[in-house]
Image (tube, rainbow, N blue to C red):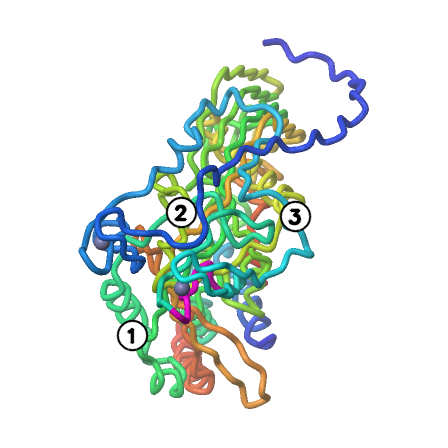
């Protein structure tokens, strides 16, 4: 069982590596990984180990008495990342599904 | 609102977790013979087509009270304070016997009910059905129950179709043995929680002002300009019907050891349509007993409530298109209401046995209210590896050519 996970993790990392790779060379890399990608896709489709109840969005909730503060700090230029460093406004900590 | 200086708050000596306030949910519940109001028969079961109880003899049908109304669970969540618990959700007493002896009120014989597996039994002498609705502190009788409304035939179709789309790489033994008719109707135990909380979240957010490319060497690279803000959000939040598994078996969702995540995935249920518990709803179905208490379930429920809060507050963060980094999240739970429920699931299970003798239980589960279906199908590893290998081989050739040509 472990070997599959190791393989999938490896392919996941490689996919991540290839997608961050700019432009044309990534296209060739996808082919070089096609076996790993195929394995991972079939594994997930049959075993669905990645699925869980999305409690964070599927549970009914309501907010009241909202007080907002938005204080400008600084303008930054020439950033290489498209997202703020350490963005965590979408993290989920209460998922009990243990995967990877 | 100006951001106050963060002052070290003098916490009131951790308020000795005020004991839960228990409200009775089995008032008036009677054990023993439950009779049809029209003909007096005790052959009572759920009519899945209508969600009502039906007499097996005269076909008379009736509905049990909606639990939400009966227990006044619709009450304003914002008024919740402290911990409110349905009597069927209170702590399990470890010593409670799972075998209860009843006196049949029709013929006087003594009948045994094993509450581990069911809360119903038939009298051996007069064939009357005896049922237990009063709560024994062993988790066998919940506060409310959500009746099956998806028929078995529908569940069989859904399971067959789910597996049918996953036949090619399925394990040959599974393919040979699969029969969707073997699905079982199971009431699984859950806790349904309402939470009234106050949240204060502090952090930093970035808003993109410009996106452009620059030349680095002979390559183009993407660059961004952005404004950084200090962000604070303070609000009240009310979470309605957060649902968590309450049997320790189902709580364990380690996907390398079980496929409980499959059953977890088919949530949510329309728990607002639950009725007061009546064991006649169990006739023809099996049930699993709750074996976890508030102590064990509170941390999970609160963590999930924080997830809901974090997710929800994104509604007010649309401006921060580069995301927000929270440095402090305080979710202060002021009130919570816990109710235990049996929720209906059609379950197809398949025990896979490895050559090494290890077993793994696969599930295909159907939410018996919404029809949502999810499953785990055992793989034919060698076949998958073989095909993946061929794909890899072909891919490598094409990939090498592409890289060589420089596409
Ligand atoms: Zn009748
Ligand atoms: Zn009897």
Q: Is residue B206 magenta?
A: no
Q: Which mark is residue B296?
A: 3
Residue B199 seen in the figure = yes
Q: Residues within 10 Å of mark 2 (few under 14, many from 20)?
A: some
User: Viewer-proximal residue, B324 or A64?
Assistant: A64
Q: Which mark is residue B222?
A: none
Point 38% across, 31% down: residue: B69
Give the Cα separation between the discs numbered 3 and 1.
Answer: 36 Å
Q: Chain of mark 3?
A: B
**Residue at the bottom extreme, as displayed:** B355
> Which quadrant: the C terminus of chain A?
bottom right
Q: Is residue B121 magenta?
A: yes
Q: Position of residue A23 (x, y in %)?
A: 44, 55
Label whose residue precedes the other's in the sequence (3 or 2): 2
Span highlighted in magenta in the image: B117-125
Q: Is residue B370 left or right of residue B142?
A: left
Q: Position of residue B43 (x, y in %)?
A: 29, 60
Residue B331 vertical position relative to residue B183 in the rendered view, above or below:
above
Q: Position of residue A76 (x, y in %)?
A: 59, 27
């Amino acid at each position: 069982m472990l070997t599959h996970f190791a393989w999938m993790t490896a392919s996941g990392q490689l996919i991540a590596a290839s997608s961050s790779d700019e432009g044309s060379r990534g296209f060739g890399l996808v082919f070089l990984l096609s076996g790993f990608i195929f394995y991972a896709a079939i594994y997930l489709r049959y075993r669905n180990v990645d699925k869980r109840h999305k409690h964070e969005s599927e549970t009914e909730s309501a907010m009241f008495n909202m007080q907002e503060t938005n204080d400008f700090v600084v303008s930054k230029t020439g950033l290489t990342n498209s997202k703020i460093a350490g963005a965590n406004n979408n993290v989920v900590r209460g998922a009990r599904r243990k995967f990877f | 609102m100006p951001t106050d200086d963060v002052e070290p708050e003098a916490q009131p000596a951790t308020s000795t977790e005020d004991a839960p306030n228990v409200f009775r949910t089995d008032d008036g519940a009677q054990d023993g013979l439950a009779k049809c109001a029209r003909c007096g028969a005790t052959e009572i079961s759920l009519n899945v087509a209508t969600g009502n109880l039906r007499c097996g003899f005269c076909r008379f049908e009736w509905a049990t009270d909606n639990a939400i109304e009966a227990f006044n669970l619709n009450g304003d969540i914002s008024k919740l304070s402290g911990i409110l618990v349905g009597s069927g959700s209170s702590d399990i007493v470890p010593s409670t016997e799972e075998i209860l002896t009843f006196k049949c009120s029709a013929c006087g014989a003594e009948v045994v009910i094993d509450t581990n597996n069911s809360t119903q039994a038939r009298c051996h002498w007069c064939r009357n059905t005896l049922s237990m609705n009063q709560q024994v502190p062993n988790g066998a009788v919940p506060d409310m129950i959500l009746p099956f409304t998806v028929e078995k035939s529908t569940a069989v179709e859904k399971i067959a179709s789910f597996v049918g789309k996953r036949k090619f790489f399925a394990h040959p033994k599974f393919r040979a043995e699969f029969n969707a008719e073997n699905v079982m109707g199971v009431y699984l135990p859950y806790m349904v929680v309402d939470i009234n909380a106050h949240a204060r979240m502090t952090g930093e957010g970035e808003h993109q002002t410009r996106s452009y490319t620059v030349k680095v060497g002979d390559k183009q690279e993407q660059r961004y300009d952005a404004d950084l803000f200090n962000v604070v959000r303070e609000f009240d939040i009310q979470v309605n019907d957060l649902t968590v598994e309450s049997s320790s078996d189902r709580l364990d969702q380690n996907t390398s050891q079980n496929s409980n995540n499959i059953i977890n995935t088919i949530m949510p249920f329309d728990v607002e349509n639950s009725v007061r518990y009546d064991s006649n709803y169990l006739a023809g179905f099996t049930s699993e007993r709750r074996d976890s208490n508030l102590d064990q379930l509170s941390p999970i429920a609160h963590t999930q409530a924080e997830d809901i809060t974090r997710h929800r507050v994104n509604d007010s963060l649309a401006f921060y298109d580069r995301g927000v980094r929270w440095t402090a999240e305080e979710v202060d739970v002021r009130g919570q209401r816990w109710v235990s429920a049996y929720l209906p699931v059609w379950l197809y299970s398949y025990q896979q046995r490895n050559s090494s003798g290890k077993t793994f239980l696969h599930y295909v589960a159907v939410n018996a209210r919404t029809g949502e279906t999810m499953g785990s199908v055992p793989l034919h590893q060698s076949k998958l590896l073989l095909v993946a290998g061929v794909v890899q081989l072909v891919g490598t050739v094409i990939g090498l050519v592409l890289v060589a040509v420089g596409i």
